[in-house]
Image (cartoon, grey):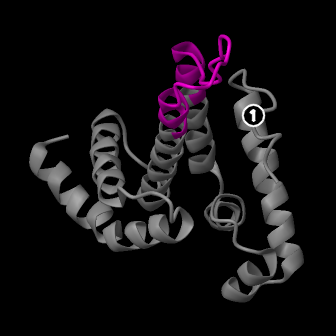
Amino acid sequence: MPAVALARWFNEEVHPHEGTLRGYLRGRYPGVQDVDDVVQESFLRIWKARLARPIVSTKTFLFQIARHLVVDKVRRDRIARTESLEDLALPDVVDDRPDPAELLSYHEKVSLVADALAELPDRCREIFILRKFKDVPQREIAFKLRIAEATVESQVARGMKLMERHLRARGINGFLADEN
């Protein structure tokens, strides 16, 4: 992608979400002190991801990146605090962080989930993202979209079924089983 087109994409599709992202991070993760760093790192990572491939839902992907960065930061901070307590006489502590191979596998699965989401019918994808990724209550989705709650429920179930079929066809089984 030419640099000018990439810059235009960033200015039109990513940068407008900066304020919302900052507010989301401050509200959802009040203990994180470096919100500016998380936002900037999120911008950098989405830029790099866009160089590699098109992004279906820029805002959703941006917020996912930010959430992962916050979780990683909290995990690193917790580990750093534990390591700084020298008077703890702990024997060899098991490192619960995923090894690089597991992390790569996870990122590949996330990419496959993004591909599966992109293949959902538009209305189904909209409802699925609101319910499963943004955790919007079923009743609120129904009200907002002026549809029956039963329609929301059936579209979420349909989305789950289609996504599981997509992932199974690519050798990934049970990846969505932990979803609510």
Residue 61 sits inside the magenta stretch? no
Q: Which residue is mark 1?
A: 175
Which of the pair 38/90 is nearer the observer? 90
Q: Residue at x 60, y 22 (%)?
A: 98
Compared with 125, 146 (above or below) is: below
Rendered image quadrant of residue 110: top right
Q: Is residue 154 left or right of residue 8?
A: right
Crowding at dot 1, Cα within 10 Å, few <14 / some 14-19 / many 20+, comes out as: some
Q: How many marks?
A: 1
Which amino acid type is marked by label 1?
Phe
Q: Residue furthest front?
A: 87
Q: Residue at x 59, y 24 (%)?
A: 97
Q: Residue furthest top?
A: 92
Compared with 94, 66 (above or below) is: below
Q: Residue at x 78, y 36 (%)?
A: 165
Q: Is residue 114 left or right of residue 176?
A: left
Which of the pair 97/94 is nearer the observer? 94
The segment highlighted magenta reads: 78-106
Q: Is residue 42 left or right of residue 28?
A: left
Compared with 67, 171 (above or below) is: above
